[in-house]
Amino acid sequence: MNAPVPATAVWDTARIQQDFPILSREVHGKPLVYLDSAATTQRPVSVVEAVRKFDLTHNANVHRGVHLLSQEATQAYEGAREKVRRFLNAASVREILFVRGTTEAINLVSNSFGTSKIGAGDEIVVSSLEHHSNIVPWQMLAERTGAVLRVIPMSDSGDLDQEAYRELLNARTRLVALTHISNALGTVNPVREMIAAAHEHEIPVLVDGAQAVAHTAVDVRELDCDFYAFSGHKLYGPTGIGVLYGREALLEAMPPWQGGGDMIASVSFSGTTYNELPYKFEAGTPNISGAVGLGAAVDYVEALGLEAIAAHEADLLDYLVAQLSKIDCVRLIGEPAVRGGAVSFLIGDVHPHDIGTILDCEGIAIRAGHHCAQPIMERLGIPATARASVGVYNTKADIDSLVAPLPQIAEMFAR
Ligand SMILES: Cc1ncc(COP(=O)(O)O)c(C=O)c1O
C-alpha cells in the first residue's frame, strides 16, 4: 500500500495515481480517463484498507457494548469525528454530526432548525446556483410552513449578483442556504463575504460544501458559517457518510430530527429526554465503517496538503479552459470570476448525452446532464451541459485526451 505523499513533497501526479488502482483499468478497451470527480471521487487504497481493517478486526456497534470490540469500534468512530473536527477547524466535536451525505445534512437542518424557527411569511434565501438538494428541502419546508423562498439571481457568467443578494436580506429572512462551489458551473462563491453580510442582519447561513472540501481548505471558524455540509464520497471517502457541522449554540437549541436509539438520555412512557450533542442528531446505528473511511480520506487529503491540491487543480482547470477555448465549436457554459473543480461546455447543437457517450467509448468519463441543477439550466436557456471535473489524480494528458475528440464530435453531428 502506498502512503500518501507528505505535504512538503513535490507534487507528483504519477505517484498519486498509484494510490488509485481503479485508474489503471480499461474502459471499452481504452485506458480510463476519469474526469467526473464532481459526481464522485475515486478512493485511494488507504481509504479502502482502513474500512477493510475495521470490518475485519474491529466491527461492532458503537456507544453500547462493554466488550472490547465495541470499545474499539467506538474509538474508531469517535476518532474519525475528531479528524473531521480538525479538518474543518470546528471548535468542538459536539459540532460534528455524521449523516449520510450533504443531502441528509441539509434535510436535517430544514426539518429541525427549519421547522422550529421558520414560519408563515418568513423568508429563506437560496441562490440560483444551488444543487437540487439545497433547493427542494427548503421548498418542502416552505410548503409545510408557509415560508417563502427568495432566490439570489446570477449573471450569464455564473456569478451571483451580490447587490441583489444584499437587497434580499431583511428582517423576515430566517436563513441563507448557499453553495460554496457550484457543481454545474464551477463558480466559487465569495462565501465569507456573503456570510458576513447575512450576519449583519443576524441571519444564520448554511453552506453546501459538497464541491468545496476536496478542492480548498475549509475553516468553519474563519468562514464564520453556522452550518456546513459535505459528503464523504466527494472527498475520496466512502459513499453513505457525510458531515453536518453546526454551530454548537444553534444545535443545542434545535430539536432532534429523527428519534430512536443513541439519540436519547432516557426513555419512558411518561417522557423522553434527549442525549447531548452530537448524539442527539444521530438516531440509530450509524455508518461506522463509513466514518472510519472518511477519517482515512481526511488523512489522505491532509497528507497531500489542501494548498498543494488547490494549486494543482487550478493549473489543470486553467489548462482545460484554455484548450476548450481554442476549439471553435466549443462553448464554455459559465465563466465565473473564480473557478473550482469543474468546467461545463457544449459543442454546437450536439446533445451533451451524445458527447458523454462518444467520450465514454474512448474511455473518457465525464458527466452529461443537468447536474441536479435544473434552475441553472433554465436560467441559461439550455437543457444540459457536458461537464469535466478534476481531482488530485488528473493530469494535463487527461485533458488532452478529453479535448482531442471534440472537433470530430462537432463534425460528426454537423453532417
Ligand atoms: C453542490 C452539491 N450539493 C449537494 C450534493 C448532494 O450530495 P449527495 O448526493 O452526496 O448528498 C451534490 C452532489 O453532486 C453537490 O454537487
Image (cartoon, helix red, strand yellow):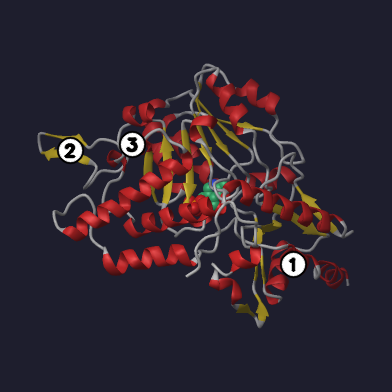
User: Label 2's element?
Assistant: strand
Between circles 3 and 2, the one closer to the viewer is 3
Q: Quadrant of the C terminus?
A: bottom right
Q: Quickly name the residue at label 3.
A: 94
- Tell whether circle 1 marks a residue whose Cβ is less than 8 angstroms from ligand 1: no
**Circle 3: residue type:** Arg
x, y (%) of residue 101? 44, 50
- Left or right placement of residue 94 versus residue 201 in this view: left
User: Label 1's element?
Assistant: helix
Choose between 327 and 369: the one closer to the eye.
Answer: 327
Q: Marks 1 and 2: in contact by CB < 8 Å?
A: no
- Which residue is drawn at the image coordinates 51% and 64% (left, top)? 44
Between circles 2 and 1, the one closer to the viewer is 1
- Left or right placement of residue 55 versus residue 304 in this view: left
* Mark 2, other Cα within 10 Å: few <14 / some 14–19 / many ≥20: few
- Left or right placement of residue 391 versus residue 227 in this view: right
Total marks in image? 3
Real-space Cα separation, disc 1 to disc 3, in angstroms = 44 Å
- Tell whether circle 3 marks a residue whose Cβ is less than 8 angstroms from ligand 1: no
Q: Quickly name the residue at label 1.
A: 397
**Vertical comparison of 81 with 48: above or below:** above
In primary-sequence order, the first of circles 2 and 1 is 2
In primary-sequence order, the first of circles 3 and 2 is 3
x, y (%) of residue 243? 42, 46
**Vertical comparison of 90 with 18: above or below:** above
Residue 339 appears in which quarter of the rendering? top right
- Tell whether circle 2 marks a residue whose Cβ is less than 8 angstroms from ligand 1: no
Choose between 78 and 258: the one closer to the eye.
Answer: 78
Q: Quickly name the residue at label 2.
A: 265
